[in-house]
Image (cartoon, helix red, strand yellow):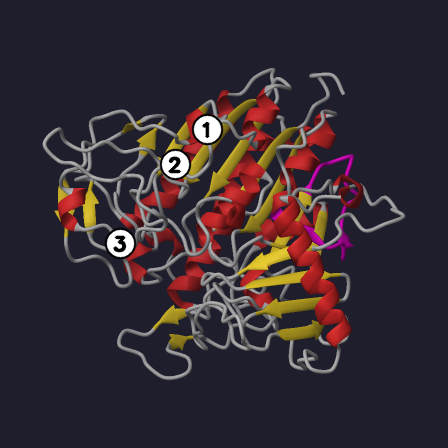
Amino acid sequence: MDNQKLPNIVFIMADDMGYGDVGCYNPDSKIPTPNMDQLAQEGIRFTDAHSPSAVCTPTRYGVLTGRYCWRSRLKRGVLYGYEPALIEPDRLTVPSMLKKSGYNTACIGKWHLGIGFSTKPEYDYDFDAPLPWGNAKRELEENIDFHAPLTGGPTDIGFDYFYGTAGCPTCQPPYGFIENESFVEIPSEYRGEPDFTGRPGMTAPSWHHKDADPVIAQKAVEYIDSQADEPFFLYMTPSAPHEPCVEEVVPEFARGQSDAGPRGDLVWLVDWMVGEVMQALDRTGKTDDTLIFVTSDNGALPGDRIKGGKGPMPYNIYDHKSCGDWRGYKAHIWEGGHREPLIARWNGVIEPNTESDALVCLTDLMETCAAIVETDVPDDAGQDSCNILPALLGQETIRPLREAIVHHSSNGVFSIRHNEWKLVIGTEGSGGWPPPSDGGPKPDSPGQLYHIYDDPYETDNQWSNRPEIVQKLTNLLEKFEQEGHSRM
């Protein structure tokens, strides 16, 4: 393709939106999602799409690098706000690859992949400490030099423009927007009483959680409006529906839009943001020239957490299945932790109102974009990315698009999916913190083996019955680990 025919690419990734939240995946959803449903009617809906991790940071690393995050310095968990840049400075990324093909690139929304902060001259801090750090101490936060340029962020790994936040806009300090390498408004106040399940921390004086996503949507629309002749890549990452799922963090116009409480209203807000982007593409005449993806970074929480709630399910659920019928939730190694809604529309290229059961992973963005712009990904990049363009185009293929997917839970539990089988290693539990909570892998523990085609909801553990399958998948996982790549 020459530059005149290259499509704009928009990748929208919600934060903790589940498979069962979106109407086109769950007809019984308590949340209206008309814009995502329209995209599915006009494009393709994947039913076996997965995030590489069941939590935020590692999935974002995988999407932008095409590489599993457990290959990096972050072996489990997420970043907490002030850790240095996780993406290595010399690593090829989706935006840096697309720039070589003439794309303008923008990251708008939640970053959560580490940024290089500086401390005040009199304060010494070890920014090379092992990852992750955990919640920042007030002493560190009050000694950050927020006037100093930020390093290692989006504009240093391939994005021409960045407008967003260092971590989760509603849950992780510092609270304030960054434009390119500088804060728009300096976080100068320490707010010690955060919204429920949020964290205290340094905050820009005019910051309000409920304004974060409307501003992100506005900036995305402004970016689309500003683009003229060259193709563009927009990576838009809302905060919603991440915790704290309370009315105070929901914009006034979104309150009560669902029958699933504040968390449901935040899913509705994601759909509204998708609609804002769709309208901007229509208004500027770019719809037919744009490939748009909508997905989520990991599974959902069950609902709104109950203040002081205890017991097996301390959430208000509203008779709504946030992860559909899949077992488990965000952070878990089970399907609910990593099976995602994934919708794509490309008018005139993708057949409308189609569905694919191809096994795909969000790390596949890099190889797919490379196929679209007709370039090659070098051997030392995109190690866990596969080209899913044939599935988007509805083409028959002789072999699967990818050999397998390696899943990873918040506490570092591995599983591997190969065709009909899914193996979980080192635990008989969830591998994550929501109920039923579970720790990390235990070397001598039995694992789990499920026949996903016959037992999609992981109810019949075949670990003891099929030792040959356990050994085969264990060997395949070890091969992927030792060889440093998994792409075909």
Q: Which residue is mark 1?
A: 89
Q: Main secondary structure of the magenta part?
A: loop
Give above or below for 479 relative to 152.
Answer: below
> Can residue 446 be seen?
yes
Q: Which mark is residue 135?
A: 3
Q: Earlier in the sequence, mark 2 or mark 3?
A: 2
Image location of residue 255, percent across then percent down: 37, 59
Image location of residue 116, percent across then percent down: 32, 33
Q: Earlier in the sequence, mark 3 or mark 1?
A: 1
Residue extent of the magenta highlight: 345-362
* Label 1 residue SS: loop
Q: Is residue 296 magenta?
A: no
Task: Work out which residue is located at the far left of the displayed protein and give it.
Answer: 122
Image location of residue 210, percent across then percent down: 31, 50
Q: Tell me which residue sits at (77%, 40%) in the image.
A: 350
* Label 2 residue SS: loop
Mark 2 and mark 3: span between their CA atoms? 17 Å
Mark 3 and mark 1: span between their CA atoms? 25 Å
Q: Is residue 380 left or right of residue 331?
A: right
> Can residue 48 be seen?
no
The answer to whether the residue labelled 2 contacts the one labelled 1, judged by CB atoms less than 8 Å apart, is yes
The quadrant of the picture occupied by the C terminus is top right
